[in-house]
Image (cartoon, grey):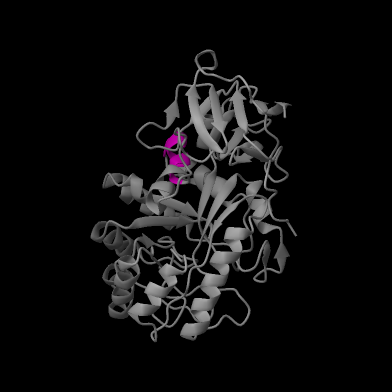
Amino acid sequence: MAHDAPSGPQGPTKLVIRNIGLMLSGDLNKPILEADTIVAENGRISAIGRFKDIDTEGATTTVDAHGAAITPGLIDSHVHPVVGDWTPRQSQINWIDSSLHGGVTTMISAGEVHFPGRPRDVVGLKALAITAQRSFSAFRASGVKMHAGAPVIEHEMEENDFKELAAAGVKLLGEIGLGGVKDGPTAKKMVAWARKYGIQSTIHTGGPSIAGSGLIDKDVVLEAGTDVVGHINGGHTALPDGQIRCICEGCKAGLELVHNGNERSALYTLRIAREMGDLHRVILGTDGPAGSGVQPLGILRMISLLSSVGDLPAEQAFCLATGNTAKMRDLDVGLLEVGRSADFVIMDVAQHSGASTLLESVRLGDIPGIGMTIIDGIVRSERSRNTPPATRVPTIVKA
């Protein structure tokens, strides 16, 4: 099992990444930055620009990107963790570490629903959520930032339960519809209670995915008024196109597209969002571990799908898995900006791709090759064991 991430170097740190060939910001408003160097001090970005214009003296670690591209660490907006880096859903260990090798540095729980014997009484479900929040705050498998502790709501809950959860540090609801609450009026009431205490909400969308879940159609989604429409492309079974359009047009919530969903419906949702000028609402997740297993490259595959088949510029597709999610989820990752957490992925066009550049290869539908992941300014992995080999690979020249 992947162990808790080391605390890292003691004392001040300064990371310099130089010779960057392409810098993707994660921001739809300006997805490409004209810069070749990033400096991070004590885990946060302190400078972005040209090497000749930036103070790189005193680096404790220097990485030569050798012309490869850098992006913010990818964010998986929809996962179902249980305990540490193990999932009973597929009896698999190290799934979080494997996702790191797919460029994912941050994950967001949509509910710890696969916990064996998951409690459904109010006391038990609150205890599980607080335990998950505490556990994953203290334990970061391979350094990945897991935002966990997402209770699945039940009819017996009252307003004070949400107040208690918030006071304990819980900031998320598990996707509504996986528990007893599947109707619009009850969901609306509880979403309002959650929002009052600063807890963000997500709703299951589409047909049932596991035993105990059920159909959640457009009427329930729109009445509930959650912050995020979870897997609008189904997890796995999607709603009819007309209902998807109604949801897109009937609210301003996040539109989450997942790997473990209907790909055609994902492309349809993307098209509607672009027509509406609401591309900023689209975020990406995997919805794993699930019946389809674990998808270490799920976010990269969604980026490639939406760009190659959905005709979305590759630099914008990366924003859906980084800056869009960071803004919607109020995270300090996902954007290459001074002051943000220094979470990066260095990648390049895969060897023997039909394209000559990273962006061209993604537009062709290829998966990039990952050469390094960095979280909080600390190198967490080098050449990926899961992606195809990158053409240009970064190296640590001083550590």
Viewer-closest of 272 and 58:
58
Q: Is the residue 395 above or below the residue 233 in the image?
A: above
Q: Position of residue 199 (x, y in %)?
A: 38, 65
> Which quadrant of the view contains residue 316?
top left
Q: Quadrant of the image for the C terminus?
A: top right
The magenta-colored residue range is 312-320
Q: Is residue 184 visible?
A: yes
Q: Residue at x 54, y 27 (%)?
A: 38
Q: Position of residue 107 (x, y in %)?
A: 54, 55
* Magenta span includes 311: no
The single residue placed furthest to the front in the displayed view is 11
Q: Is residue 204 left or right of residue 3?
A: left
Viewer-closest of 224 and 232:
224
Q: Residue at x 62, y 39 (%)?
A: 374
Q: Is residue 112 visible?
A: no
> Which quadrant of the view contains residue 389?
top right
